Structures are given as structure tokens and as C-alpha cells.
Amino acid sequence: MTNWITGTCEANGIDMHYVRTGGDKPPVILLHGLMLNGACWTSLARALEADYDVIMPDARGHGYSSTPNHGYCYENLAADVVSFIDALGLTTPVLLGHSMGGMTAAVVASRNAKRLRGLVLADPTFLTPQLQREVYESDVADQHRRILNQPKEDYLAAVRARPSHRSLELIELFAEARFQTSMFAFEILMPPNPDYVQLINTLNVPSLLVIGDVGAIVTPTVATELAGLNQHLKVVQIAEAGHAVPYDQPERFSAVVQTFLRSLKVGIQ
């Protein structure tokens, strides 16, 4: 990461911070989920940086980006990304998003297909109205508030001590991102989400939906139904992965992404 670029640009009226691998290569933008930040994509960026200019922005209310006290809906997050693409002068990037970032990427692609080369959705927040309500009424925001009210060192020590198959680097990146997530950001959980069936119906760009098999949001049944709606959408399921599919199986996820990127004829063949 030593040679990577960090920067901030104005996008849609906010300052968006980003990390970028750089180079005269096809751009790939990675959008993170709630309570994460761009740096959480470090492992995937390392796998892609030889062939691609990997750009990892922090969403509003996350990381080092602006934290306005309002505007945390998918329409605004999507507008942030489109403005970000313009601000950096990127030409037909591939957009990859996980969870909240996946829904954001789907909204961007459905409205700006000609601006993108391709789209990867990693278990996006394609929730039914009932599940949206359950998540919104859950204690996830209260849990986050409690974490922010404790010393970061204590939280870090606790997460380091838990058994985990994830690397210590990733555990620490997640913890750092958690403490950089504003309470305002949880407004994104307020229903209704965009209609994901309508989003998929309107996609006109090569697209890949990557799901797990253990407690993922997008079930294999829903994924199959969505693929049946749009010839541009392909589905890949990764075994032994849950909602955090890019982090549960990072090597498999990276391989799937690289195969898709090669299919778009971008990067080194």
C-alpha cells in the first residue's frame, strides 16, 4: 500500500476521500458496506492492482469522507458515486459494490449504464420490505453507539482476542472503519430501499451477482429469479461464505472478480 495514492475530491457537495492504486490501467471502483471504508478492500486491491487502477472511496459518513447530518439514502449515495467518477475524470469504470455498496452500485448502473464498463454486486442489500423493517427496528445502530462510546483500544483488544479465520490486518481495518462510521450513516437503513427487481430489470451493462451460501441476503432462489429477468446478469455462488462474501472467502472472491473483469476485455489478457 506504500505506493498507493490517497486523496480527497469534491463530489455531489461533499468531500470524498479515496485510496487508489494508480497507473494507466482500466479503472475499477470498489464500494464498501455500512460500517466499513475504502481501506477494507486492501486485500482485493492488491490482487487487482497489477492490471487495474483500483479506486476505493469512503462513502459519506464513513472513513475520512464528509459527515453531513443528512442525505443518507441510496439516491444520494449513487449521486455521490456518479459525481466522484466525474471529479476523477474516470472513463467507463467497472463498479463493484458489497452490501450497501452493492445496492448503491446497482442504482448507479440502472441510471447510468453508458458510464460503466461492468458491474459486480457482492450480496447487495436486496431486502424484502419486511426484512428492511426488521433491520431498521433492530438494535444494530444502538450496538454501534455503544461501541463508539468505549475506548478504541479496548474494542481493538477485544476483537483481536476473538477466534477468527480473517487476517489480523483485516480485523484491524474493520475495527478502524467502525470507529470512523458516523451514527448519521445508519439513516441508510430507513425503509424503503430502491426496488431491486426494477433495478435489475433496467440494467444494460454486463453484470455479475456474487452470493454466499450461509446466511447471505440474496438467496440462491432470488439470485436465479433475478438472472432470469436480465440477460446481462450472471450469478456466481461461493461456498462457505455469508453476507461478507468478499471477506469470508477473499481468494475465491478475487478469482471470480478477475474472471469477470477478463470477460469484459479490460486489463491485461
Image: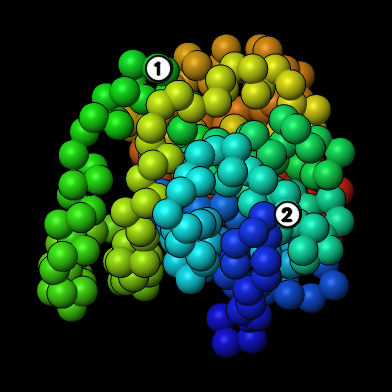
Residue type, label 1: Pro
Position of residue 220 in the picture relative to residue 141 (left or right): right
Q: Which of 158 and 7 is in front in this view?
A: 7
Residue 169 place in picture, x, y as percent: 36, 73
The quadrant the C terminus occupies is bottom right
Q: Is residue 226 above or below residue 6?
A: above
Residue pictured at 60% horizontal, 67% vertical: 15
Q: Mark 2 points at which residue?
A: 83
Is 237 situated left or right of 75 in this image? left
Q: What residue type is labelled 2?
A: Ser
Q: State the CA–CA distance, disc 2 to disc 1.
A: 29 Å
Q: Is mark 1 on a helix, strand or loop?
A: helix
Residue at 47% x, 41% y: name it: 99
Look at the picture and state if 183 lies above or below 51: above
Q: Which residue is drawn at 67% across and 55% down?
A: 12
x and y percentages locating residue 245 in the rendered image: 44, 44
Q: Looking at the picture, tell me which residue is in the foreground, 166 or 141.
A: 141
Q: Earlier in the sequence, mark 2 or mark 1?
A: 2
Q: Can residue 258 be seen in this snapshot?
A: no
Task: Judge left or right: residue 223 versus residue 82.
Answer: left
**Marker count (numbered):** 2
Q: Is residue 192 visible?
A: yes
Q: Is residue 211 above or below residue 180?
A: above
* Residue at (61, 28) in percent of width and height: 235
- Which residue position is annotated with label 1? 129
The colour scheme used here is rainbow
Classify the position of the N terminus by image quarter.
bottom right
Q: What element carries label 2?
A: helix
